[in-house]
Amino acid sequence: MALQGTIETFALPDVLRLLASTKKTGCLRLDGARGSGSIWVESGGIVGSEATGAPHAGSADEVLFEMLRFKDGDFVFDADADVQIKHSPAEVEATLASAEGMLDEWRSIEAVVPTLDHYVELAPDLSGDEITVSKDRWKTIVAIAGGTSVGQLGDSLELGELPVSRNVKELIELGLVVIGAPQAGGYQVPAAPPPPPPPAPLAEPESAPVISLAPTADDAFDDEGPLFDPNALVIEDTSMEPEPEPLLSAPAEPAPPVFGGAPPPSEADPSDAAEIARQLANLSPKAAKAVAAAAKATTPEERERALAEVDDEEDPINRDLLIKFLGSVNS
């Protein structure tokens, strides 16, 4: 069905009633000096709506309230348009009744708050000794602060023209705010946000300080005892290197013991060394430095003080296993 015309000759409510009675599906678009608006219908029920002058409208009747205020405009109904379903179907008559009720309310508000361009600010003095303010009303007072336009206030509170103007009118009647002349340049309805840009390629993560443990867990023990050299536990800063170093690097030959002579036999389990190596490889730089200091400690007290710097929540590590392992190395 081709349906088009002007609202000067065919009123918008009559167009909507015709679409409802014939159970049409498609999009009714209205363009005029005030802006544009669209209403999507499915089987005669309103399922979606939007208007450039009502960016914060949360329901079809708020959008229709805005469109009913058009004094001129051309409309066209496109039965082939994709229907944008934004809410459950609403009956045309009920939506029109609600929107027309808003128009009646607006006429009383308009006498106090003429346009969204008008400036509003806190009153310099209160008319009474005390005033009780609700939580929601206080949000409006804070948003007004040093002064703003009614439209900008609506943007900050995400309210449409009718609800924000209603709030301002109530505050004026309480003597909390005053309204001034329109702002220079007028209020501009915020543009619709642009579509989000495509996701950027993931950046290469910065190289973090790496723990090098020599020898590795696989070579940490031989028949004569542990070959772990605590002096070989170092923190390498690879942030300036072009390629990150492996988390665990093993020398070609096992490092000799640093305490002179062959170390005594140990009861340590090789699986303990593997677990310690795994935990050390995942430490943060701060925790890795603390473990390195513990490895170089010459007394249990020094070792405990060094390990106290490790945050158990950030860097979970088996302290008992680590102390046992370092003890077997330093004994």
Image (tube, rainbow, N blue to C red):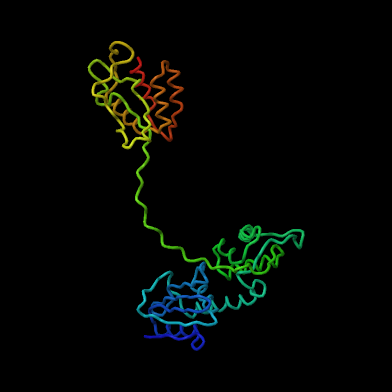
Left or right: where does residue 122 sit relative to residue 98?
A: right
- Number of numbered labels in the structure image: 0
Which residue in the rendered view is the most extreme toward the bottom?
A: 9
Left or right: where does residue 120 sit relative to residue 226?
A: right
Left or right: where does residue 179 sit relative to residue 67?
A: right
- Tell which of 290 and 322 is nearer to you: 290
Which residue in the rendered view is the most extreme toward the top?
A: 261
Left or right: where does residue 132 sit relative to residue 106?
A: right
Task: Quadrant for residue 43, please give it.
Answer: bottom left
**Above or below, 74 relative to 244:** below
Task: Quadrant for residue 165, please give it.
Answer: bottom right
Task: Quadrant for residue 98, please give it.
Answer: bottom right
Residue 197 percent coordinates (x, y): 39, 58
- Tell which of 276 and 134 is nearer to you: 276
Residue 106 percent coordinates (x, y): 61, 75
**Above or below, 295 relative to 182:** above
Residue 231 percent coordinates (x, y): 35, 20
**Above or below, 222 relative to 50:** above
Residue 313 percent coordinates (x, y): 43, 35
* Image quarter of the C terminus: top left
* Image quarter of the N terminus: bottom left
